[in-house]
Image (cartoon, rainbow, N blue to C red):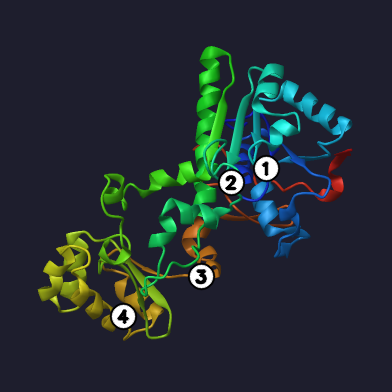
């Protein structure tokens, strides 16, 4: 039995934030009933495929049941109300106002089941000047300020490799729902959670945007220790066109590496303010360009420096660390990334995602 066994979740979400959240609940034993429109979840059609299913869909919908409902029909509404009567959590990812127009807004659902925790996930929340503005992750990152520091050496913002706004919203929604379930144990009443991707992402800026938070200047990457302005928190190209990263700025790492490279005179620069380490960055860039990525990996193997090769996903998923911790598993006809949350003494077993062919249909 998982930590959430006995909890029933109605999941009316698609793509990333909501499905990630409810998958984490399903991983811990919750009964998650995924409500799909007659056309199905669009993620089912997203490439690549393995074992007849979208890898995306499988990894974000494993362990769920699926029910196809036309929520514009009387039969579809009746079927959803029957689920509401016995559910603990209701998660919707529509644009603000859509759930209410369908007849399943928070007031109507709370009146029907006062113990239910209702969670809305949207780009900008249910109120405010941007509430009705359409947006996916990239637009939210742009509005949040994060995209401005996701830039290359030329200062131009680039498309992020991680959908941080989506992931922040999913994690925040999960935390909020679990808090509400705990609160229900005391009060006997459910709660409403309005999760905005923008709201969820902004707190992640505290370590880089201190000046702006305090009413001053915004951060600029070249002058930020965590954004490329420090020699020991940076990425360098190697002789074979690949890259390595230095990911620790502590004095002990600076001293160890620069002593080994016979440039102890540069050690003070490792402690200099970001933006004033140009000579150190230039030296490290020139040095790393003299060997291949894997040669540097061997060179660093027994040195106490926060060094890492920059791996592609195939290399990352194939490394011994991933195998040792069981992070990539095969189940349901394809591969899945195991959950990060696994409790001692409890064995997690991968489950498949619902096949469209076996989906119940109520029109």
- Closer to the camera: disc 4 or disc 2? 2
Q: In the image, which is nearer the foreground, mark 2 or mark 3?
A: 2
> Do the CB atoms of the residues marked 1 and 2 lie less than 8 Å apart?
yes
Which element is circle 1 on? loop
Q: Is residue 251 left or right of residue 71?
A: left
**Marked residue nearer the N-terminal end (1 or 3):** 1
Give residue 60's position: percent from left, percent from top: 65, 49
| Residue 86 picture location, percent across and down | 73, 22
Q: CA distance from mark 2 to mark 3?
A: 24 Å
In the rendered image, the residue lying farthest to the top is 187
**Closest to the observer: 337 or 108?**
108
Of the 4 image quadrants, the one containing the N terminus is top right
Instruction: List the residue tagged with mark 4.
Output: 288
Residue at the disc numbered 1 = 13
* SS at circle 3: loop
At numbered mark 2, what does the secondary structure look like: helix, strand or loop? Answer: helix
Looking at the rendered image, the disc whose residue lies closer to the viewer, 1 or 3, is 1
Tag shown at residue 312: 3
Residue 212, image x and y in percent? 30, 50
Across and down, in percent, residue 17 comes to 59, 46
Quadrant housing residue 248? bottom left
Q: Residue at x 27, y 61 (%)?
A: 224
Question: Crowdedness of circle 3 by 10 Å Cα count: few (<14), some, many (20+)?
Answer: few
Q: Which residue is mark 2?
A: 17
Q: Could you give the CA–CA distance between mark 4 and mark 1, rounded to whole angstroms?
A: 46 Å
Q: Front-most of 41 and 104?
A: 104
In the picture, the disc for residue 194 is none
Q: Quadrant of the C terminus?
A: top right
Quadrant of the image occupied by residue 279: bottom left
- For the residues marked 3 and 4, what is the alpha-carbon distance in whole angstroms? 19 Å
At a point 30% along the width and 72% down the height, the residue shown is 300
Outermost residue on the front side: it is 129
């Amino acid at each position: 039995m998982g930590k959430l066994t006995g909890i029933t979740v109605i999941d009316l979400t698609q793509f990333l934030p909501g499905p990630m959240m409810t998958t984490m609940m399903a991983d811990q034993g919750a009964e998650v009933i995924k409500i799909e429109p007659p056309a199905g979840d669009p993620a089912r059609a997203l490439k690549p495929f393995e074992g007849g299913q979208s890898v995306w869909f499988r990894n974000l919908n494993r362990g769920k049941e699926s029910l196809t409902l036309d929520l514009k029909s009387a039969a579809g509404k009746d079927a959803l109300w029957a689920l509401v009567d016995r559910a603990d959590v209701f998660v919707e990812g529509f644009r603000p106002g859509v759930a209410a127009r369908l007849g399943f807004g928070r007031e109507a659902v709370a009146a029907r089941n006062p113990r239910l925790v209702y969670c809305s996930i949207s780009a900008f929340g249910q109120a405010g000047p941007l509430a009705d503005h359409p947006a996916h992750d990239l637009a939210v990152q742009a509005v949040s300020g994060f995209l401005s520091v996701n830039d290359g050496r030329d200062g131009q913002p680039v498309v992020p490799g991680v959908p941080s706004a989506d992931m922040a919203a999913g994690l925040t929604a999960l935390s909020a729902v679990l808090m509400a379930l705990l609160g229900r144990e005391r009060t006997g009443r459910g709660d409403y959670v309005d999760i905005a991707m923008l709201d969820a992402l902004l707190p992640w800026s505290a370590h880089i945007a201190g000046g702006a938070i305090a009413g001053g200047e915004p951060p600029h990457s070249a002058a930020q220790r965590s954004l490329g302005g420090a020699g020991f928190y940076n990425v360098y190209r190697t002789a074979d066109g690949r890259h390595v990263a230095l990911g620790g700025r502590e004095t002990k790492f600076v001293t160890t590496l620069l002593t080994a490279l016979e440039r102890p005179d540069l050690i003070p620069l490792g402690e200099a303010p970001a933006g004033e380490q140009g000579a150190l960055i230039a030296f490290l860039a020139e040095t790393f360009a003299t060997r291949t990525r894997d040669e540097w990996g061997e060179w660093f193997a027994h040195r106490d420096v926060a060094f890492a090769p920059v791996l592609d996903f195939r290399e990352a998923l194939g490394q011994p660390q991933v195998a040792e911790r069981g992070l990539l598993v095969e189940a349901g006809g394809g591969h899945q990334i195991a959950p990060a949350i696994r409790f001692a003494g409890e064995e997690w077993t991968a489950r498949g995602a619902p096949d469209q062919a076996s989906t119940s249909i109520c029109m």
